[in-house]
Image: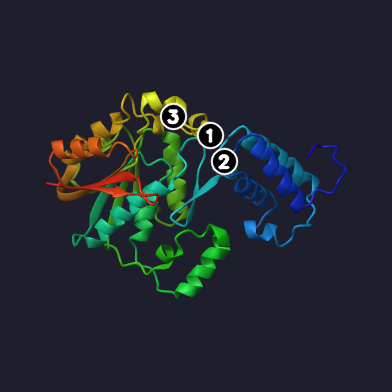
Amino acid sequence: MTATDSQTWTTRALLSWIRQHLERNEVDSPRVAAELLLASVIGGERVHLYMEPERPASVEERARLRELVARAARHEPIQYLLGEAWFYARAFEVGPAVLIPRPATETLVEEAIRWIRACRQTPLRGADVGTGSGCIATTIVAESRPRPRVSDQFEAVRLQRMLGADAVRDAEAVVSPRAAGPAELRIEAIDLSAEALEVARRNAARHGVAEAISFRRGDLLEPLGGEAPLDFVCANLPYISDSEWERVAVNVRDHEPTLALRGGRDGLDAIRRLVPQARALLRSGGGIFLEFQFDQAAAVRSLLDHVGFEQIRIVRDHEGLERIAAAVAG
């Protein structure tokens, strides 16, 4: 597709051209990427692309597509190009200052929410360390609040309209009734990056939970030193080791923030520092929830055990990989 093309570029033709171009450049999931890019430019959901396949693109739309497709072909993440990523059935603003939320982190959130719902103490105060986009803190607060019951059928239709029929993952879990959380829940969202904190603030406001989250700039839990004990700590910290860095996919290594990815010689530098800080700030019985690389479970368990955490569990993510540690302060 060039600026001087005289043919009529329909939705069908554009989808085919974009997909083939991305395939030649070895971009992951080229069909889905093509659909997302085209839908973002012409407006509407992915399913609508197939409802109007002969719709002609305007000159302005073609120009915008050329720019986006060229960037995608250089392995810039599609989520950054679109400006948002989906996490726990919610859209979150993302950009080069923050990591793109991954499905594994949803497992961390699920474990934290389960603990919060089982906790009979209120109010609760937690920390989201390395908050990035704020998807963990925002989701925990939003999911811990009561919401009106609706029929599963109505909710499923709403989600399909919002996400597209083929994008509703694990629908039964999404539409199942949610138990009421604590009457009061506050989270301290902490990050070293001022830019990341601004993104996190906007995401919290977008989802109506900004009043329940405080945003702190600093290293791990140091901004909370000397304050009242915490009830829980969540963290998705950098955990890619130095030896693995060159093998990381180019779309991640060259575009997502290195500060949020690289974890030092064995990948555990940040986690190793956080664990004793968390133990010192958590009340007895408080919970900790950590994400790590699939082959780091034994090392993370040892770190938690060494400083006095109890009831340590290693939880598998939705792909069956050991990715989350949950434990209780003794």
Q: Secondary structure at mark 1?
A: helix
User: Seen in the image, is 295 located left or right of residue 157?
Assistant: left
Would you name the residue on which mark 1 appears? 251
**Residue located farthest toward the right when viewing the structure as drawn:** 6
Label 3: few (<14), some or many (≥20) within 10 Å?
A: some
Q: CA distance from mark 2 to mark 1?
A: 9 Å
* Residue type of the residue flagged with mark 1: Asn
Would you name the residue on which mark 3 appears? 258
Q: Nearer the viewer, residue 10 or 187?
A: 10
Q: Earlier in the sequence, mark 2 or mark 3?
A: 2
Is residue 225 visible to us here?
Answer: no
Residue 304 spot, x, y in % from top left:
19, 39
Q: Nearer the viewer, mark 3 or mark 1?
A: 1
Would you name the residue on which mark 2 appears? 28
Residue 305 spot, x, y in % from top left:
15, 39
Residue 131 spot, x, y in % from top left:
37, 42
| Residue sitting at x 57%, y 40% | 28
Q: Nearer the viewer, residue 314 or 195?
A: 314
